[in-house]
Image (cartoon, rainbow, N blue to C red):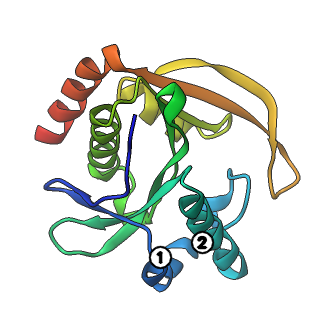
């Protein structure tokens, strides 16, 4: 598996590999405290720069590729999503750190992003794409199931969140041989 940072685009969204130049583009979108309620670290307000630096550091190490998500038609910024834990030797990676501004939630933005990220990962040779979320994040869990991911289980007390609360991480995955059905489902949702 060989995956490199590159622009991914369809009719709905454009995913641009994260650059320092995107810092001030994302800052106002990240200001919504609700986005960070179920995350392990904060990225709103005074915490934004540390979060953004962490995203760039992962990219510099080569085990993460973060993306600024834009509206493909208007160019307006909508949020962030990333490849994490990129593990070429085992042909797997994770999609995570996904969040969108309020206007983009519940629209075709998330399925459009996942269609691009999953397609690119499997085209690059991935055998497994992982996703995980907070046990309380039912919206994310439902979105993962709706896109065709398999719920694998829960790692209890997996992360200590910035709130002081323990997070149980609910794991999902899509395997290479499951991708055609998941892709067809995403394509049908986007065409509707």
Q: Residue at x 15, y 69 (%)?
A: 73
> Which class describes the residues within 10 Å of circle 1: few (<14), some (14-19), or many (20+)?
some
In the rendered view, would you say 70 is above or below 83? below
In the rendered image, the residue lying farthest to the right is: 164
At 19% across and 56% down in the image, what residue appears? 12
Q: Nearer the viewer, residue 53 or 13?
A: 53
Give the image quarter of residue 143. top left
Marks 2 and 1, Cα distance to the nearest angstrom?
A: 9 Å
Q: Residue furthest top?
A: 177
Labels 2 & 1 near each other (Cβ < 8 A): yes
Q: How many marks?
A: 2
Q: Name the residue beneath numbered marker 1.
A: 26
Horizontal and vertical percent for residue 42? Answer: 70, 65
* 3 to the left or right of 116: right
Which mark is drawn over residue 52?
2
Q: Position of residue 135 (x, y in %)?
A: 68, 34
- 2 sits left or right of 52 in the view: left
Residue at 30 percent across and 51 percent down: it is: 107
């Amino acid at each position: 598996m060989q995956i490199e940072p590159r622009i991914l685009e369809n009719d709905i969204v454009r995913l641009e590999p994260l650059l320092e130049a995107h810092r001030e583009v994302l800052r106002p979108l990240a200001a919504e405290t609700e986005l960070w309620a179920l995350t392990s670290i904060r990225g709103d307000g005074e915490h934004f720069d540390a979060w953004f630096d962490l995203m760039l550091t992962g990219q510099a190490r080569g085990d993460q590729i973060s993306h600024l998500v834009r509206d493909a038609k208007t160019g307006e910024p909508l949020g962030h999503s990333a490849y994490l834990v990129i593990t070429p030797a085992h042909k797997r990676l994770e999609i995570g750190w996904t969040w969108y501004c309020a206007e983009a939630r519940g629209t075709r933005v998330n399925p459009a992003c996942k269609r691009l990220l999953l397609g690119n990962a499997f085209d690059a040779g991935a055998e497994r794409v992982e996703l995980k979320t907070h046990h309380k994040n039912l919206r994310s869990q439902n979105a993962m199931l709706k896109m065709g991911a398999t719920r694998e289980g829960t790692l209890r007390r997996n992360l200590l969140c910035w709130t002081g609360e323990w997070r149980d991480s609910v794991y999902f995955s899509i395997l290479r041989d499951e991708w055609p059905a998941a892709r067809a489902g995403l394509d049908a949702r986007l065409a509707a």
